[in-house]
Amino acid sequence: MKEVIKKLTKKNFKKTLGFRKHLHMYPELSFQEKETSKYISEVLKSAGIKHSKGWAKHGIVAEIGSDKGASIALRADIDALPIQEANKVRYKSKHDGIMHACGHDVHTSSLLGAALILKSIESELKGKVYCIFQPGEEKLPGGASILIKEGLLNKIKPASIIGQHVHPPLEVGKLGFKSGTYMASADEIYLTIKGKGGHAALPHNCIDPIYIGSEIIIALQSIVARSSNPIDTSVLSIGSFQSVGGTTNVIPDEVRLEGTFRAMNEKWRKKAHKLIKRTAQNIAKAHGAQCDVIIKVGYPCLINNDDITSRTRQHAIDYLGKRQVVELPIRMTAEDFSYYSQLVPACFYRLGTGNTSKGITSPVHTPTFDIDEEALLVGSGFMAYNAIMSLK
């Protein structure tokens, strides 16, 4: 079966590459993927693959195989980022200020390629493969959470769910895996500190929200440094500190802080939210100011099921060879695939897309991100191979 899959992957490579270039040229932002969804549907329809549309507006769920046996779900995200592409390539984004800078075009084209392979050997499947083309991964509340609320997992009832993500630091031809808790939860923090402004030369007549905000930032770091168990990895970063009306000689009435809190432990995550709010408000109160705290709860921790990840890793070794499969460290970045992983045995792995000899090294979320297109051979072929082997 391995050789059959590899042969079909090479046969379909030109199509898969065409999918990727088209999607890269016409990116759409989260929950705005109307034309992307239409394109995916047309590809599936032309291949005779049954699918339903309209999940979270633009999501698509395709199915291949038989109801007799187990089922597995394969997921790809379809949205792009608000980034102006700087690459000088023929397939450069035609939409100003929008780019597939996180590789979702690669994920989608890989899954389309895998779907074509699986459809051509449908009679060999010992069960059913669901292909989930999901919108809105890059924006809260996350397309995955909406699909789940709409009843997707109750409808398809997969025994496991698999996702892959591009990884520029990993050389093309390789796959990376990590069992257990792999990626962090991600929450957004918004603080508004209201004091009393005035002349900067007369601070004793003011309640300086800039000074208070600075004290709060330092104090918040102690939550991670002194209130959490050192073995429970977490990070709290403030990325924006803006005054409302302040200047060189004016202390403003108000400042606004924005940041993120990441954690690898859900229990600690909830406790930290309370500590963040209490710390910020108490410091402001001690100075006679007020601090409004909003914490937007984002994606939970992503957990790779030990058994499913072990099985998928072994399939990767069988398909690519042991030297092409690596162990990954935990990541403090977040993914809405985590919602699936909280409910269904899951494996989220990394697809090597970099090539140092060709100078393809730019990280995701940058204007120069790109891939070695040979990664699509592994991306589409392994998804198909893993699916068919997992159903045996």
Image (cartoon, rainbow, N blue to C red):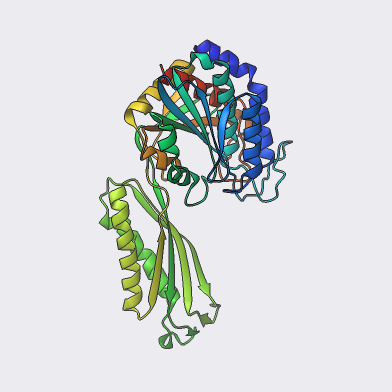
| x then y, percent, for residue 228 | 27, 53
- Position of residue 38 relative to residue 4, above or below, is below
Measuring 44% from the left and 24% from the top, which residue is drawn there? 325
| x then y, percent, for residue 208 | 43, 79
Measuring 39% from the left and 65% from the top, which residue is drawn there? 217
Query: Which corner quadrant holds the C terminus?
Result: top left
Measuring 40% from the left and 32% from the top, which residue is drawn there? 157
Measuring 54% from the left and 27% from the top, which residue is drawn there? 379
Q: Report if residue 322 is visible in the image.
A: no
Q: Residue lying furthest right in this view?
A: 90
| x then y, percent, for residue 170 | 50, 31
| x then y, percent, for residue 187 | 41, 54
Is residue 130 shown left or right of residue 329?
right
- The quadrant holding residue 245 is bottom right
In front here: 41 or 247?
41
- Position of residue 198 relative to residue 9, above or below, is below
